[in-house]
Amino acid sequence: MIARLMPEQPAATPPGRPALWSLLLWGLLSLLAALGCIMLMRQPGSIAPLWLSNTLIVCAMLAYTPRHWPTLLVAHGLAVLGANMLTGGTATMALAFVPGNVLEAWMGAWLLRRHGNVRSVIHEPNALLQALLLGPALAAGLGALAGSITLFMLAPAGDLLGMFTTWWLGSALGWVCVFPLGALALALGPRQALQACLQALQLPLALLVAGVTLLAFSSLPYPYVYVAAIGMLAAYCGGFASASLAAPITVAACFGLISRGLMVLPPQTGPGADALHLLPLLLAVLSPLLLGAALEQSRRRNAEQLARREARYRSLYTRAPTLLHSTDIEGRLLSVSSAWLQHFGYRESEVLGRKISDFISLDPQGLASPELLPVLTAGEPVEDLPMLARRADGKLRRVRLSMVWEEDAGREQGLCSMASLRDVTEEQALLKRLDEERQLLQITLTSIADGVLSTDEQGRIIFINRSASRLSGWDMNAAVGQAVTEVLNLRAAQDKARALDPVGSCLATGRMETLPPVCVLQARDGHSYAMTGSASPIHDATGHLRGVVMVFQDVSRAREDARRLNHMAHHDALTGLPNRVLLMDRIEQACSNAARKGQGFAIGFVDLDHFKLINDTLGHAMGDQLLQLVAQRLSGELRSTDTVCRLGGDEFVLLLSEVQGPEHAARVAEKLLRQVAEPIALGARQVTASLSMGLALYPDDGQGAEELMKHADIALYRAKQLGRNRYCLYDPAMAATAVQRLQMAQLLRQDMEAERLYLMLQAQVDIEGGRYVAAEALLRWAPSSGPAIGPAEFIPVAEESGLMLSLGRHVLQLVARLLFERRDLLESELRLAINVSPQQLVDDRFPEDVQRLLRETGLPPPRLELEITESALMGSPEESRRTLLQLKSLGVRLAVDDFGTGYSSLSHLKHFPVDAVKIDRSFVQDLDRNAGDRALVRAIIAMAASLGLECVAEGVETESQVQLLREMGCHLMQGYLFAHPMPYNEMPLWPSLRRIEPEHRRLH
């Protein structure tokens, strides 16, 4: 980086008498810089928030001797005056800007020349900080003070503190943009500074800085964080030169976006308004400069340390106790260690400059392959190459050569080798003797997949393979020489006190000995393994018994597999909890024990609330992980005598032993609800879960397993009815309710066939036009026996009993009949709205049913509106979106009903092809009394309008609600104030009263 470009001596100061044209050039550059800053961000007569001209002149003044400063300052003053007048300023106002700018330039140059070290700025953070304090802080502050006072005297009505703040920070930004590049040029000279800025890495870094800055200021939150981060990355990669380029690029991008209107500053007022915008930008570009200077300082120090270490290394090299030498690329010795000279008996003057081949050569016996020969001249590293070394007395020594090649900047040829020699003469002799013993052990390596060991005639181990070492727990080296009974602790499984010694028996009899069928090896570390195997004698060629080879096999896995299969048959594969088979067995045992001991217990049915939403939004893998974590929490909170079972899906069953009564069971349930409600980490997300639980107690709620589980399930259903995230104890009245639901489902199925269901219509009103725009079809049920049943009662029963799809198709048939009977309604412009259930939304046949209704009735698709509840959309968002797209392709309208009561937000609606939202009546009924409801409704209406969606208010019952909704921009309403639900053959197509005026007269 810059450390490589730094000259030995500081760059010379330019000639003492610069040409007049060069001074005029600086004035022209100052004029152009001033014009650019004014035209970029300043209105005539105001202060530019970015000012580069002063710092540019300061850098020029530092490049020349002080006697040329007046000329430069005059040129600068004329440039400031000319720039302000050329941009529309009056002569008086233009003159007012001159003193402060000239003062700042003179003060900055004087302070830096007298008290600063400009040429050290690029590699010393302290020098950079000192320069920043003298320039942007002190000189710019004094210039800003003088300039703002001058402007204030001309315009006393102005904000003096605001003018000072803007002037100061604008000048400070100019310093940070220009001064680092000027310091780079002053320290290295213009040519080397340009080379540093044009290195290969600088252009990509500059483009990266510009791109990230534009992206951060135009579309990212907290943009200064990204700007500072990318600037520091540039400084880290490219040093001070990159940081110097990053500063003006960042500031230019920021003010460019502001001038183009692509970056809107938040509205601020007061004296410190500009500081809120300029100060973070100033800090964001300062940090990379400091980092760049620190990195350059670190590199400079590292280079100095490297030189010292190299000198120390050369000293250590010659005194190292290892046989070291280095050669050039032609093989001439450059240096040798003292140990090398001593070992081979030479003096240094006898070897340096001679070819290494005069002293060492390849060992033909140790050379494994002729292909290894070329590596000595190819610049490739060598490791343990067999060589022969010739001592001064003529004797040969077998050595191993290891060598690496490295660049030597001090030599013209560029490469030198560093090699070490290891004398292996005695080692080779020892290896030859060991080779004969190794031949004896080869017969034991024929089957090493299992544990293998061999012994001598005394039963002491002479070889043991890795498998045997692992099973016994003995290190291979430590086991050699030990008695086999010390290493292999074999015991009979039925009688572990009786030790087994198959090797001893084999040595005594000379015959093969087999381990018993059930045998255990107790390892040294305490582990036990099920074993099978045999010990066989080893005879030499003369028939003499030389030892025993024992082969044994670990069969623990086979036995563990059998145990695992039994476990899998009785436990859940995902959570490891007992399954239904094991649970029923334990409940039966609990019933028997409770009857015998007179103790009670409880059965709890548990469901995870809204688990399907987790699966649909986060994926099944996260859903499985949630089930595992919930299972762990449930198990961790219960006693060892209790049982947690997973039936499947998100259903769990609890067996709570020794429960004294309902209060005891309730305390356990509350503890479990609290524990599961703690936040759960799923990958990078945190979610919260809740449980619904139903409890049945033995013997009050049942005497057998099936009866208890049935009653616990009924109690669970009651907990869900009450809003979930709670528990319910079984009550006999719940069973009666369950029976009633079953009877209602049977009666509903019968009355559907008996045509006991009918439609009512309720109008939707355009309050501005004073007309009906739509009618919502509402299903009613007059059962064959008993009073009428509202949809709030029979719709949930239909959903639970699986009747919802049939009921939905029946509603479509009723709509078709309505349109056939009301031809005037069919031929009018009114839309007909139909409610759609969640089950219909995921039914593949539903779009076909709607298409059939349109085809048979001739109703134009845009006049059919399907209302889907918000919770139905978010229950299965992907399936819902597919169905809605199919329906939208038919041309029908889609509306979100009961909006605000589910899990979505208006931001989710952009993913669904809906046309309208209907604000739930719960937010409308207290609209004139509840400020929170008003704020929420206003937000829904505004956001719906921004998404191009119609907004319908439901449940409008008072004129004050009409007035509030109209003021909020909602003109479509539905409620009792305008029309009650009425038989479809009685509904008029037009309101009976005239259009509602601002006095809010009713339509009906």
Image (spheres, helix red, strand yellow):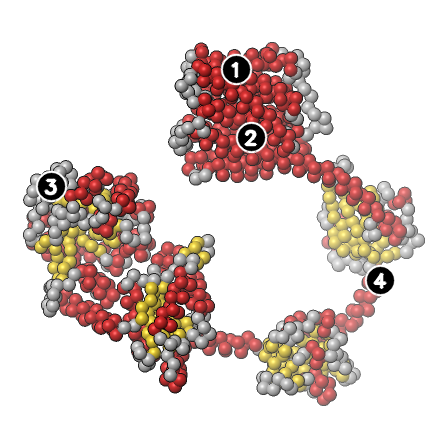
Q: Amino acid at mark 2?
A: Leu
Q: Nearer the viewer, residue 170 or 341?
A: 170
* Whether residue 336 is situated above or below residue 468 in the rendered picture: above
Residue lying at the far right in this picture: please name it: 393
Helix, strand or loop status at disc 2:
helix
What's the CA distance linking mark 1 and mark 2? 30 Å
Alpha-carbon span between mark 3 and mark 4: 117 Å
Neighbor class of circle 3 (other Cα within 10 Å; few <14, some 14-19, many 20+) is some
Distance of mark 3 from mark 2, alpha carbons? 70 Å
Give the mark nearest the N terminus, 1 or 3: 1
Q: Quadrant of residue 995?
A: top left
Residue underneath mark 4: 426
Secondary element at image label 1: helix
* Mark 1, residue position: 99
Could you tell me which secondary element the residue under label 4 belongs to?
helix
Quadrant (top left/top right/bottom left/bottom right) for the N terminus: top right
First-in-chain label (1 vs 2): 1
User: Which residue is at the front of the view, 241 or 545?
Assistant: 241
Which of discs 1 and 4 lies nearer the camera? The answer is 1
Q: Where residue 886 sits in the image (x, y, percent)?
A: 26, 52
Residue 103's place in the image compared with 821, above or below, is: above
Pointer 1 with pointer 4, Cβ within 8 A: no
Q: Are marks 2 and 4 in contact (CB under 8 Å)?
A: no
Q: Residue at x 26, y 60 (%)?
A: 839
Characterize the local packing of mark 4: few (<14), some (14-19) or many (20 or more) Cα atoms within 10 angstroms. Answer: few
Q: Is residue 850 depicted above or below 800 in this figure?
A: above
Q: Amino acid at mark 4?
A: Glu
Q: Does the rendering let one see residue 410?
A: yes
Q: Tell me the crowding category of disc 2: few under 14, some 14 to 19, or many 20 or more residues within 10 angstroms, Cα based.
A: many
User: Which residue is denoted by mark 2 in the rendering?
Assistant: 245
From the image, tell me which residue sits under label 3: 1001
Task: Kindly identify the amino acid type of the residue bearing the numbered disc 1.
Answer: Pro
